[in-house]
Image (spheres, rainbow, N blue to C red):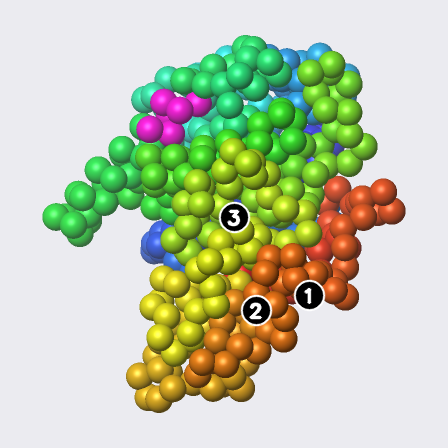
Amino acid sequence: MQLLDKLRILAAAAKYDVSCSSSGSTRKNTPGGLGNASYSGICHSWTSDGRCISLLKILFTNYCVYDCAYCVNRVSNDLPRALFTPEEVVALTINFYRRNYIEGLFLSSAVYKNPSYTMELLLKTVKKLREEENFNGYIHLKAIPGADFSLIEEAGKYADRMSVNVELPSSEGLKLLAPQKKHEAIIKPMSLLSSKITERKEEKKKYKQAPKFVPAGQSTQLIVGATPDSDLQIMKLTENLYGQFKLKRIYYSAYVPVSNHPHLPNISAPPLLREHRLYQADWLLRFYGFSAGELLDADNPNFATDLDPKTDWALRNLHLFPVEINRADYEMLLRVPGIGIKSAKRIVAARQVGPLNYSDLKKIGVVLKRAKYFITCRGRYYGATVVEPEHIRNKLLAGSKSYQPQYQQLSLFSLYPDIFAADEQLSRITGEL
């Protein structure tokens, strides 16, 4: 098979892996080397089918020994297959970099023959790039669950970021849809990477020249909608993964209907809105001080479709509102819908000069069309409605674009589907809620 044919097949196969990230590395160029991974992250754009065009995003192979019902590359699926050699991936990366097509490499793989054999091929590839080609650009490498730990550990010396995909939110889901995979086999390499990253950070404090080990941290991916797991279960898992393994990011991927397996949901399009709500909640966990148990509970196990998680939480906890903008502490300001991290910091800083009035809030960056129902300014309430959940909900939804899946033709890889209002599209990028 021609190299370009392999590239076409394996680049297309990689688009289902959304945990493609390129930030957090400080790897610098060396004399005679090629490339540089900036700390601020590699700028990248996205094509209409979801591929990152500034990273060479490919699978090493889509030949797979597993038969996971939710995966397009499962062994029982009839589709074109291809397999790179380490030399071919190295040549593609270097040639594309020199032509300014890419700024780094995202390399994943299906499980070819067995996990350790696959991991050995991936390790050989990145080792050739670093040692033989002196490539210092960004490399995000997938760790293969079930592979020998020594291979994963050695790969961490050459990659900027590594990731182990959790894939399904529960071990029950794995048993149902991917019986060949074990939950423990996924968690163990995550634990290994986490401990080695922490160990290397401690060494770095003592020795400036301590060698790097996955300097950009590790990430993972969860498939949403393939199993009946609730948003509450997913958020609790997310909270545990961030706390236990200090992950850099968790990515959520709406299940793409690629199979008619009896244990899979009968849907015609991926649940993109649900994926969007989980990303919003993820921001709340990481930066806004929320816990999974606050955002959802047994009575409300799934996020609302009409409101973002922060606004929905505020309406369910209206006894805490309205808060006086000139007296509320920073932590409480973060919980007000329409006030993000930047605007909360600006409010705290501005109050040291003098009390704020309502017009000041707009200049600071507060989204008043949401925030006005949950705050007072100098003792005055500007919400123009009764402070009751249903009244405020109706005001918030008045004039907004409601979600009507029966009339929407969803684009699988559209970055901003039409089901999202303009302010929600912005929050997907900034995380400001």
Mark positioned earlier in the residue sequence (2 or 1): 2
Toward the left, the furthest residue is 206
Please tell me which of labels 3 and 1 falls first in the chain. Answer: 3
List x then y, in percent, for residue 40: 43, 60
What residue is shown at x 69% (from left), y 43% (from top)?
Answer: 272
Residue 155 horizontal/vertical position (percent): 38, 31
Q: Quadrant of residue 412?
A: top right
Res 431 visible:
no
SS label for mark 1: helix
User: Which mark's residue is nearer the viewer, 3 or 1?
Assistant: 1
Q: How many marks?
A: 3
Q: Which residue type carries mark 1? A: Lys
Q: Is residue 328 magenta?
A: no
Q: Is residue 424 above or below residue 81?
A: below
Camera sees residue 240: yes
Q: Position of residue 294 (x, y in %)?
A: 44, 45
Q: Marks 3 and 2: which is nearer the front?
A: 2
Q: In the rendered structure, which disc, 3 or 2, sits on the residue that comes first in sequence?
A: 3
The answer for how far apart the CA atoms under marks 3 and 1 are is 23 Å
Whether 188 is drawn above or below 305: the answer is: above
Residue 395, label in figure: 1
Please state the extent of the stretch shown in magenta in the rendering. 186-191
Identify the residue position indicated by label 3 in the image. 281
- Identified by mark 2, the residue type is Tyr
**Residue 61 in which image quadrant:** top right
CB atoms of marks 2 and 1 within 8 Å: yes
Could you say which is closer to the camera, residue 413 or residue 183? Answer: 183
